[in-house]
Image (tube, rainbow, N blue to C red):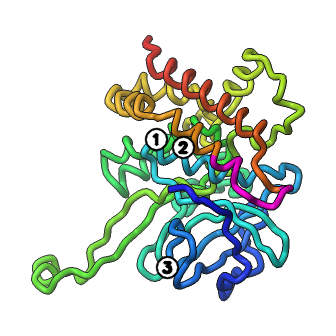
Amino acid sequence: MIQWNPIDVCDWGRHFEFSEAYPEGARPKRIVISPAQPVQHVIKPDWQYMFKLSDPRYPEQFWCELIAYQIGLLLNVPVPPAHAAYDSLTGECGSLSEWFYEPGVDMFYAAGYFFYRDIRNFDKEKGAQHNLQTAMQLNKEFIGDNQIFDFWSMMLFDCVIGNTDRHQENWGYLVNLSPNSKSVARRKKENFSIRLQFAPWFDNGTSLGYQLLPHKFNNWTDHRLDGFITKGTHHIRFALDRLEQIGHVESMRFIAEHNPKVRQLLIKRLKDFEFGQLERVLDRLVELPMPIDARLTRDRADFVLRLTSRRLQLIMENLNERN
């Protein structure tokens, strides 16, 4: 779904604890509560949303959250819905991301919680021991063997958007407790069933060339564009005995070599990707009547399209590369 008009959060409810500022992450943000009868159909009623601003150095950054959400839809990867918003009282503009679980019903555990448990002296600030080998062990323990398909679909998403900030606090697991029927509770001697799944891939603003200002990308050659893409890395490393960050493009070649079934799934997701739909979405976002100094520029939209198109090509080439 995509919005037709920007959303004014001026009169939205205030979170009892995080109405002024949310303590995690680098960019300014706060939690707001949607109205019981929202005007726009894209908004859930009486629900928590994260209103996040851009880094002051990169005023168009918040648009990356919105574009990443649309790319997630096209890849069939779960990403929290994100919309363009502003506060008419403060003059602030930013992304409005839907809270991805219901507090009191579901619980979210960041992957870092378990990395800290399993890896002695884990460097929480830099996440230097955040590694793929441990991640896969945790995923298998909590979700099962089939986790590899969902996890690598989300890794594919990060490759397509070029996300460099998927650290151990920016992904994790949702735990849902549901009451068993009386007969099941008697048989299992358990009053509740526990279900674990991956949380949607959230916090996607450090992506899509957000840090590049127009005068830096308007005249890029294809060679320079390829250099920018191939230098991009995931936050995650290979293993505790190989603590180098995995390149975005390199990670696709890695999984293609190690798991042919996952490779087939990722290739299918890329083949199903409707690039024309992404073009139409960006046209709509450029036309959104945001405050004049916060609009998505045509130059930025065109660069994101060019960047994403080339990333898709390079990813497909690496998935098809065989030793």
Image side of residue 323 versus residue 185, left or right: right
Query: Where does the image place residue 59, in percent across and percent down from the top left?
Result: 83, 52
Secondary element at image label 1: helix
Residue 172 visible in the snapshot: yes
Instruction: Give residue 294's position: percent from left, percent from top.
Output: 81, 56
Q: CA distance from mark 1 to mark 2?
A: 6 Å
Residue 75 disc label: 1
Query: Of the residues shown, which amino acid type is indicated by label 3?
Result: Pro
- Mark 1 and mark 2 in contact? Answer it, CB < 8 Å: yes
Location of residue 96 by image quarter? bottom right
The residue under the point 50% across, 37% down is 156
Q: CA distance from mark 3 to mark 2?
A: 27 Å
- Residue drawn 53% across the image and 85% down it: 36
Q: Please state which of residues 163 and 246 is positioned toward the viewer in this rendering.
A: 163
Which of labels 3 and 1 is toward the front?
1
Q: Estimate the x, y position of residue 54 in percent, counting from the top left.
A: 79, 57
Q: Residue at x 36, y 63 (%)?
A: 196
Instruction: Examine the rendered structure and indicate whether residue 197 appears above or below residue 227.
Output: below
Task: Classify residue 240 as left or right of residue 173.
Answer: right
What numbered label is drawn on residue 103?
3
Question: Is most of the magenta stretch helix, strand or loop?
Answer: helix
Are discs 3 and 2 less than 8 Å apart at CB? Answer: no
Q: Which residue is denoted by mark 2 in the rendering? A: 71
Q: Which residues are magenta?
A: 284-293
Work out whether mark 3 precedes mark 1 in sequence or the reverse, and give the earlier one: 1
Residue 288 on the magenta segment: yes
Give, as a three-letter code, the residue at label 2.
Answer: Ile
Marks 3 & 1, CB-CB < 8 Å contact: no
